[in-house]
Image (tube, coloured by chain):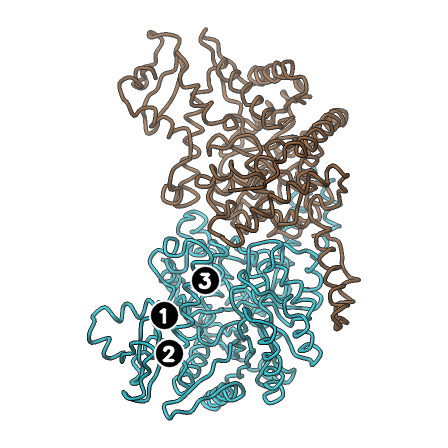
Chain colours: A cyan, B brown
Amino acid sequence: MQLLRVTVIVISLCATSTLASYWEDRAKLIKSDRSIAVGSSLVLNTKEEAANEVLMGYKFKEYDYGFANPGEFLPAQHFFKGKAKVERSEVFKIIKKLPKGASLHCHDTAIGSNEYLFNLTYKDNLYGCWKNGIYLLYFFNETSVGNDCDWQRLSTLRSSNESFDTFLKSQLTLVVDDPDSAYPDLNSVWSAFMGIFETVAGLLGNKDVWQEYLYQVLKELYDDNVMYLEFRGILPDMYDLEGNTYEGVQVVGIYYETVQKFKKDYPDFQGARYIYAPRRKVDNTTVDGYVELCLKFLELYPDFVAGFDLVGQEDLGYPLIDFIPQLLKLKDKGTKFFFHAGETNWNGESTDLNLFDAILLNTTRIGHGYAILKHPALYDVVKERKIALEISPISNQVLKLVDDHRNHPGSILIANNFPVVITSDDPSFWGSNGLSYDWYFAFMGMASRNEDLRFLKQLAMNSIEFSAMEEAEKEAAYSKWRSDWEKFVDDILVDTPTVINIR
Amino acid sequence: MQLLRVTVIVISLCATSTLASYWEDRAKLIKSDRSIAVGSSLVLNTKEEAANEVLMGYKFKEYDYGFANPGEFLPAQHFFKGKAKVERSEVFKIIKKLPKGASLHCHDTAIGSNEYLFNLTYKDNLYGCWKNGIYLLYFFNETSVGNDCDWQRLSTLRSSNESFDTFLKSQLTLVVDDPDSAYPDLNSVWSAFMGIFETVAGLLGNKDVWQEYLYQVLKELYDDNVMYLEFRGILPDMYDLEGNTYEGVQVVGIYYETVQKFKKDYPDFQGARYIYAPRRKVDNTTVDGYVELCLKFLELYPDFVAGFDLVGQEDLGYPLIDFIPQLLKLKDKGTKFFFHAGETNWNGESTDLNLFDAILLNTTRIGHGYAILKHPALYDVVKERKIALEISPISNQVLKLVDDHRNHPGSILIANNFPVVITSDDPSFWGSNGLSYDWYFAFMGMASRNEDLRFLKQLAMNSIEFSAMEEAEKEAAYSKWRSDWEKFVDDILVDTPTVINIR
């Protein structure tokens, strides 16, 4: 870990013995410590300083209340239990308004708010069927309904069973009253998690519904003051109710058109890019196919397809090492990688060894990288090459890597100014949305009590800096973000009530 | 964090593109990573290599079983739930036999096994009384019994109530079936924890019982293959049944004599030192008194009293900064410090700021230092001055800093070769004893899958190196330890059953 050296202070420490020199050394050492973290090199202007005072007034009050009442501290609670209280936090309210830049790690079918997702189940031609789980599918009319399962219109299921909606909602979310009992270990929560992806795949398999959904995803991010998106997807086949099917390049085209439509409607939104991220648990021949497809996408949509990744529970395989020849081929053709790697608390298993392959393959960013601090040989590479670590606080908690955000390695990565961005992963499935909830936990749970507006500003700037945007696009994004930022700072100063009252 | 730089590899990585060079770079990078951790610089001899194979056979089997069945992995479970299974682990059995060197962080009244502690409640003259908790006290005879409380002989309480023993046991331990419900937050577990200290103080306030207890403590450590002890204590007043009372220097003398008696009976035990560690939640005048006492102890028992510390739940105050003039006075007189500091997952509160004061006061070791990685300005100082961090895995779990040992900062400290020792804190109160349980969690939960016998050997050597022993004592301890180590290695090779079967 390449850090600011504090040798000068180290040397002087041994000499400390008078009270005056003690306080001087202490102040120096603490100042030196606080000059390292993410954002600490930024200098705020007068207005920003004033806004920072408002923010920190709320933060100190909330943080110190937690210090005195540790059971009440929200970053130490499960998100399912603390979410409503987070929404009442004044710090959260400020973060919601803050221009957060880009959202760089989320999966296409798991981004939109869960409420919106559920509303889609009222689509006319949607059918459901139970086969070790609920499956959803659209049929053009009664005669086209498949006979592979006992398909029934959702409207029929709803009217025949009062509790159907409650059941259906439960199939679209991991949220439960008692997550510890419902998901006793990592594999059980991943199993439920993967099940939701399957159910949602049916709900969004209809091209027209998908387009409506993606548009809404962009709108929700826009409303959460996020200006740009890079999203991963496995690229499923799609169909419409006229009997057309779409696959591969056509599906990328559908994504692209939807983003273009949104950008036309909201010209200050800076756009979106797609990371082709198919399932990892496949054989070599399948990955050969991925490579061909990916290269085709990059050729046809060079400004929209950002690069390649592989998805699925890393612990269950297959690691990157299984596909090195294929991945080297992509690398040689200039493909950018955005690999999931080290999303684990294991140390020395295939999951964290993925970090080595991701870095050897010159990955542009690392999805999660939760295990990176257990591998010091990688620190310098990550820092020197500015390989951003995509930290998803709520995801890591819900998917059972860590309970208390203060124990998340992000706390150490932030303290040491590693290149980080805060991301949302699959907010839909845990009742989150946008970026604000994850930013709240990074700010209140991972960053120190002292990290302030500079930290949040740096996170926003990092998200643009570490995106796959071209330089000219980044410039445009920065320019727009700067004006949003100024407006945000003004708004804080205008909005502040005289009495600060968190609870 | 001052680490091995891997610049050569960093540079070559970008050039990687052929398959052959890829594998070469990968091997180099992984090798470099594995050359950093605690113990990785040691070179094993042929016998040790053979013993290591036995150890690692068991470790890989147990670790990989956990990887496949994460809910079964013992370092991810609460100690109260997993303890019996730990005892069946072959890795644990080897660790029990391993000569572990010194035990450097534990509190005098909380070291002996809980079973032994309970047996002491059968002492003849012991009385109990209920006043918002059970209090214990010895009275010479019926007429000397105090009237400040409804004191009754324990034998009477026992015979009058069948469930009294169950109740009494519960007052001497934190162990419960469902710790998460019993102790919902850190303050609640600390409150119960402090209550046990009060109950036990009554049980051990009788000088003769205390001496018997301390002797047993040393015996249990000895049986767990620990050769030397440094223990903290608040130095309570004592009495005997002849009506004598003992305080201050006299109590230190009682401790010293007991250790001498044990050393006489077990000449290969290397001895013990006492760290005077009174309560921190007191005013300045009280600390003035601590200083005077401590200096007197050091003058009278320079080979037995190692130095000074302050105890009590750090989060509740008072931090070291409240007593700087007093502590500087001790420092000027050459007193060694062994400060508790940063036993917290807060960041930027008084508890982790204690780390700065401990280091500015030139502390010899740091008790816990759990928060150190959130303060990069301190890394170099800790490493260059070899300020050992006393890591107590089970304590940090039971006292609710972290649930899963894989998320303990110790995992990162170990990976980065920080100066660490593994310690037990208050094993009595959570049903542990000796050092083996804590070493097991460090080896299986914090160290990587690859850390092997060299890691354990280094831990043992660290415990001697970072002790307060004089150089000549250290030499003697090393010499004894080396012969124990050779015997241990031989024993592993002899004992190994043909079939390795963990569960």
Disc 3 packing (10 Å; few <14; some 14–19; many ≥20): some
Amino acid type indicated by mark 1? Leu
In the rendering, at what x and y percent does residue A223 appear? Answer: 43, 78
Looking at the rendering, in which quadrant would you find the N terminus of chain A?
A: bottom right
Q: Which of B332 and B355 is in front in this view?
A: B355
Q: Nearer the viewer, residue B303 or B56?
A: B56
Q: Residue at x 53, y 75 (%)?
A: A232
Name the N-terminal-most of marks 3 and 1: 1
Q: Mark 3 points at which residue?
A: A190
Name the N-terminal-most of marks 1 and 2: 1
Q: Mark 2 — on which chain does it sit?
A: A
Disc 1 packing (10 Å; few <14; some 14–19; many ≥20): many
C-alpha separation, residue under disc 1 versus residue under disc 2: 10 Å
Amino acid type indicated by mark 2? Leu
C-alpha separation, residue under disc 3 versus residue under disc 1: 14 Å
The reply to the same-chain question for discs 3 and 1 is: yes
Q: Mark 1 points at which residue?
A: A172
Q: Is residue A322 left or right of residue A224?
A: right
Q: Mark 3 — on which chain does it sit?
A: A
Compared with residue A435, is residue B387 higher up or lower down, i.e. above or below? above
Q: Residue at x 26, y 71 (%)?
A: A165
C-alpha separation, residue under disc 2 versus residue under disc 3: 20 Å
Compared with residue A38, is residue A144 higher up or lower down, i.e. above or below? below
Secondary element under disc 1, as helix, strand or loop, is: loop
